[in-house]
Image (tube, rainbow, N blue to C red):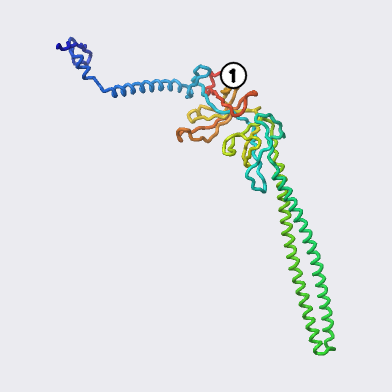
Amino acid sequence: MESTPAHEVEVSSEAGSPLGPNESLSVDSAALLRSLRLPRGVIVGFAAVLVVAALSGVLLLRKRDGSQGSGVVKQSRGGAVDPQTLRLKGMTAAVETRAIQAPLIAGQQVGTLTITKLIPSGTRVRQGDLLVEFDRQAQLRNSIDQQAQADDLNQQVIEAQAKEDANRVKDETEILDAQDNLAKAKLEMEKVELLSRIDAEKAQEDLDEANATLAQLRQTFDLKRKAAQASIRILEIQRDRARETMLHAQANSALMEIHSPIDGIVVFNTIWKQGNMGEVQEGDQVRPGVPFMQVVDPAIMEVRVPVNQEDLLALKIGEKAQVRLEAYADMVFPGQLESIDPMGTPGDFSNKLRNFSATFSIEGHDPRLMPDLSAVVDVDPAGAGSGFK
């Protein structure tokens, strides 16, 4: 079998080459291939490294292009790339809003309140319109019971006071009789010289007994008055407490109707009810103090967006912006940066990266502009080339 002819590879000499200008190197190509044969895993790994290096170079070039000027990452707007625009996403909110919560019941431990009447969500209301009504039967029943108890206790106070007045008159009469007996005993003692020794001793005993009886009656008189007043006072306290409970029940009954504090639109909150998250309906039970509804005034709206710490320094209060609603592509409102919260919150991926909440006002109004809509805010920190007014 004939051997494969060798192929010559001419290597021309260059500056710094060990070969002379007219020298060439002859190499067996098959031997060269055998010598360069590598495992498949090494070749695949080497190719992956080359791809990662190429992508890193492209991203580095893009970052350098976007970081020129104001240091804001470039965003596309309407298909065009604007290196000066910062795009933020957030949610719309009403500037003026009032939270509606289930009433707190005074003087009672109430687990839940049952909704008997509820205005539909999205309804436009005027100040003073009825929003929700809760079941007030328990409050009315409690008010009636406490009123009956207060009346009964008041009657007991009257009877106790009348009894005390009668006892007082009786005790005063006994004291007067004791005073008369004492006066008679003293008169008998004035005749002691005329009486026999036995009668004199008996007169002295009558005088001592009259003195002791009068002193005892006077002492028990004060004790009886204090005891009677204490008993009457206890009944009065019980009566007043029942009246207070009755008044609380009447006030709680009035709280079962909630009226709108402002003009606006009714918006339901999602709350935990009966083991699930959802909006309230007629017949649902709500715990006292839980905010389950809002009345918002859509005439003045704003957008609240999170801003990372890298973009925070590029924002200034008063900067103009454009606000777009993702649900309505044709709606564009002028806006302005009104405030930035000074305290940041930890980022989603690292505690070292902070997010700050910024608020943009919205100029103009549209019936479709409602709270809790996803919005996009385009800000031009450089103030040029954006067309903002």
The total number of labels drawn is 1
Q: Is residue 338 left or right of residue 107?
A: left
Q: Which is more toward the observer, 357 or 194? A: 194
Q: Position of residue 360 (x, y in %)?
A: 58, 28
Q: Residue at x 47, y 24 (%)?
A: 71
Q: As displayed, is residue 361 above or below residue 103?
A: above
Q: Is residue 298 left or right of residue 215?
A: left
Q: As displayed, is residue 291 above or below residue 363?
A: below
Residue furthest bottom as drawn: 196
Specify whether residue 11 is in view: yes
Q: Residues within 10 Å of mark 1 (few under 14, many from 20)?
A: few
Q: Residue at x 80, y 67 (%)?
A: 168
Q: Position of residue 281 (x, y in %)?
A: 64, 35
Residue furthest left as drawn: 1
Residue furthest top as drawn: 22
Q: Which is more toward the observer, 113 or 379? A: 113
Q: Which is more toward the observer, 359 or 36? A: 36
Where on the picture, by quarter, is residue 239? bottom right
Specify whether residue 365 is in view: no
Q: Position of residue 133 (x, y in %)?
A: 69, 38
Q: Position of residue 297 (x, y in %)?
A: 66, 30
Quarter containing the N terminus: top left
Q: Secondary structure at mark 1?
A: strand
Q: As displayed, is residue 224 above or below residue 35?
A: below
Q: Is residue 66 left or right of residue 175?
A: left
Kindly identify the amino acid type of the residue bearing the numbered disc 1: Asp
Quarter containing the C terminus: top right
Where on the picture, by quarter, is residue 57? top left
Q: Is residue 47 left or right of residue 225?
A: left
Task: Name the residue tied to disc 1.
Answer: 330
